[in-house]
Image (cartoon, helix red, strand yellow):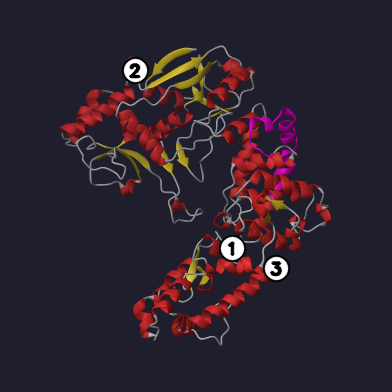
């Protein structure tokens, strides 16, 4: 094993020209903007960024080992380009040696993206299926950072920051990092400095970035060990030992590596399945972790995510049964979409595994099963069935389904009625338990119950808001006093109840914005109907108590009916 160094410029060239690749056992790029920014901050300050590990091999050795390689991502897009592209089976370049990255993928990918590409991460409060939710950004270097006294909340000077082109901050001179590759000589950097009128501190920073990018030998930022003359099996063992601590790879990533190793197109099949599932309906957040657990449940293995669970016979079963596993999962997602579920109202993806296993064992997606699925999910989410000791819950539900004639039994809570989990949790819910959620203020719980009360609204396709039926502004002290409500305790109670389920409804985002502070009387006079509210009930804020108790009872009755309590 040799210890060597390489310039950032040379490493980026090797990636771009097809001399450096990622093995199939590596995971995808998972760093976020801030991690890339911090990496560059460490580099510019001269801090160590760790040693890399490469497998130095030849084109012939790659072909003989049937090794599946992947290219680095250049323009990362969290939704559209988050997976590494598979390299050609026969490498089209012709180098004496090729370098396969065993340790350091995230750092090298971050350098490559920042110096030659871009990122597009989802921003908050934007919908996943809209392009404006993923603005394209490039990394910028604050040339004033050494002299600047401006610090972030953690007390650090912000030296590097991702910006979209139109949003670059004007508080300092920000240099686009990828432009450093345009300078072939230090003289060209000095020309740029003169042309742009940079001061002494700004000039020093730009020159420093240029020198770091080109630094070789003892001055190089990138140091690595290279493994020569090793078989792929040897490399796999080294890879697992290096990453078994979980410092760079999660347990799921290591297990994923175990499954796809030697499985032609295995990685693509699993990643394509995850992508297909996540793109259904309003979108979902399925992950490798979910797929791994599902595979363990389906193959009758111990559900614990650990190496021992993935014995050779288990891995073989997963590969042999993958097409059937895929069919069951796709059908399960279709059922979720039909019921209006998406990433916005699923709190535990583990709760979906028994559903998929039911389908896998011949279960149906009949209307009766769909109704049963809705009840099952609501109870599972509200009671956090799979949030504690989820492995035990999955093992117990699998055991029950193994004894069930799934082909002739509709899916529903009835199947799991006799299961008692850790903490005496059961797949049952009383009317009193449901009523308890009526005391919770606007939250995920109220959102979930509203999706049951408004079953025809396809969440994710349209932006839906939890709207206050009586606008929240109606509960300020001045307006309540004007309505004749002066008792302090009553005011306090109404202000609290005004933010609970009986005063909430699902309303399309744009409609909610237009409704805004409109009083309930005005809203109804415009021809708008309110679900779970009889026409005879007063819409005046002074009669809020009557409104509240009436709508609470109507909603509770409906939930009791739907959940068959």
Residue 182 visible in the current orientation: no
**Mark 1 near mark 3, Cβ–Cβ under 8 Å?**
no
**Image quadrant in which you'd find residue 311:** top right
Distance from Cα at disc 1 to Cα at disc 3: 25 Å
Provide the residue designation for mark 2: 216
Viewer-nearest residue: 82 or 372:
372
Q: Position of residue 103 (x, y in %)?
A: 49, 25
Distance from Cα at disc 2 to Cα at disc 3: 72 Å
Q: Is residue 325 magenta?
A: yes
Provide the residue designation for mark 3: 565
Give the total of numbered labels.
3
Q: Is residue 445 magenta?
A: no
Image height check: is 229 above or below 99?
above
* Label 2 or label 3, whichever comes before in sequence order: 2
Q: Tell me if mark 3 has few (under 14), some (14-19) or many (20+) residues whose alpha carbon lies within 10 angstroms of its own.
A: some
Provide the residue designation for mark 1: 458
Residue visible at 69% across and 71% down in the picture: 561
Residue visible at 50% across and 74% down in the picture: 503
Main SS, magenta residues: helix
Residue visible at 57% across and 75% down in the picture: 552
Q: Position of residue 150 (x, y in %)?
A: 23, 43
Distance from Cα at disc 2 to Cα at disc 1: 57 Å
Q: Is residue 74 left or right of residue 165?
A: right
Q: Position of residue 224 (x, y in %)?
A: 44, 19
* Label 2 or label 1, whichever comes before in sequence order: 2
Q: Is residue 395 left or right of residue 504?
A: right
Q: Tell me the magenta residue range.
A: 303-330
Mark 2 or mark 3, which is nearer to you? 3
Which element is circle 1 on? loop
**Image quadrant in which you'd find residue 378:** bottom right
Residue visible at 73% across and 59% down in the picture: 413
Q: Position of residue 428 (x, y in %)?
A: 69, 61
């Amino acid at each position: 094993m040799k210890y060597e160094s390489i310039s950032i410029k040379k490493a980026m060239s090797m990636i771009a020209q097809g001399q450096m690749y990622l093995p199939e056992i590596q995971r995808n790029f998972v760093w976020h903007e801030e991690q890339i920014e911090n990496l560059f901050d460490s580099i510019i300050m001269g801090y160590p960024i760790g040693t890399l590990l490469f497998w130095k091999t030849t084109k012939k050795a790659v072909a003989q080992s049937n090794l599946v390689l992947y290219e680095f991502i250049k323009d990362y897009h969290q939704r559209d380009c988050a997976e590494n592209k598979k390299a050609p089976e026969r490498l089209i370049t012709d180098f004496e040696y090729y370098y396969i990255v065993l340790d350091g993928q995230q750092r090298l990918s971050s350098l490559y993206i920042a110096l030659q590409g871009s990122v597009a991460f989802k921003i908050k409060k934007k919908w996943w299926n809209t392009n404006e939710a993923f603005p394209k950004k490039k990394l910028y270097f604050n040339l004033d950072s050494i002299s600047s006294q401006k610090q972030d909340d953690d007390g650090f000077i912000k030296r590097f920051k991702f910006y979209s082109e139109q949003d670059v901050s004007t508080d300092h001179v920000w240099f686009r990092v990828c432009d450093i590759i345009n300078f072939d000589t230090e003289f060209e950097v000095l020309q740029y400095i003169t042309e742009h009128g940079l001061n002494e501190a700004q000039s020093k920073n730009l020159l420093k970035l240029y020198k770091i990018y080109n630094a070789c030998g003892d001055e190089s930022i990138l140091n690595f060990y290279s493994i020569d003359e090793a078989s792929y099996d040897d490399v796999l063992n080294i890879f697992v030992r290096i990453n078994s601590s979980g410092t760079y790879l999660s347990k799921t990533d290591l297990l994923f590596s175990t499954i796809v190793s030697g499985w032609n197109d295995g990685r693509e099949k699993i990643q394509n399945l995850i992508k297909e599932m996540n793109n259904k309906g309003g979108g979902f957040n399925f992950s490798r972790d979910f797929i791994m657990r599902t595979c363990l449940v389906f193959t009758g293995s111990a559900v614990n995510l650990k190496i021992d669970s993935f014995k050779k016979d288990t891995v073989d079963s997963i590969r042999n049964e993958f097409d059937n596993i895929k069919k069951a999962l796709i059908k399960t997602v279709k059922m979720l979409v039909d019921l209006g579920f998406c990433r916005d109202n699923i709190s535990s993806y583990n709760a979906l595994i028994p559903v998929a296993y039911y389908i896998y064992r011949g279960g149906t997606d009949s209307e009766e099963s769909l109704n049963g699925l809705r009840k099952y999910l609501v109870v599972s989410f509200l009671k956090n069935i799979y949030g504690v000791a989820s492995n035990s819950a999955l093992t117990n539900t699998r055991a029950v389904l193994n004894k069930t004639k799934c082909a002739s039994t509709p899916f529903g809570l009835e199947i799991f009625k006799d299961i008692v989990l850790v903490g005496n949790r059961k797949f049952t819910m009383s009317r009193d338990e449901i009523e308890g959620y009526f005391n919770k203020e606007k939250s995920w719980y109220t959102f979930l119950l509203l999706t049951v009360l408004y079953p025809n609204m396809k969440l994710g396709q349209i932006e839906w808001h939890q709207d206050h039926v009586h606008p929240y502004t109606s509960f300020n002290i001045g307006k309540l006093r004007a309505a004749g409500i002066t008792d302090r305790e009553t005011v306090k109670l109404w202000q609290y109840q005004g933010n609970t389920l009986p005063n909430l409804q699902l309303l399309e985002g744009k409609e909610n914005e237009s409704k805004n502070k409109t009083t309930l009387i005005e809203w109804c006079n415009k021809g708008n109907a309110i679900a779970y509210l009889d026409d005879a009930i007063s819409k005046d804020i002074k009669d809020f108590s009557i409104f509240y108790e009436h709508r609470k009872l109507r909603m509770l009755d409906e939930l009791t009916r739907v959940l068959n309590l």
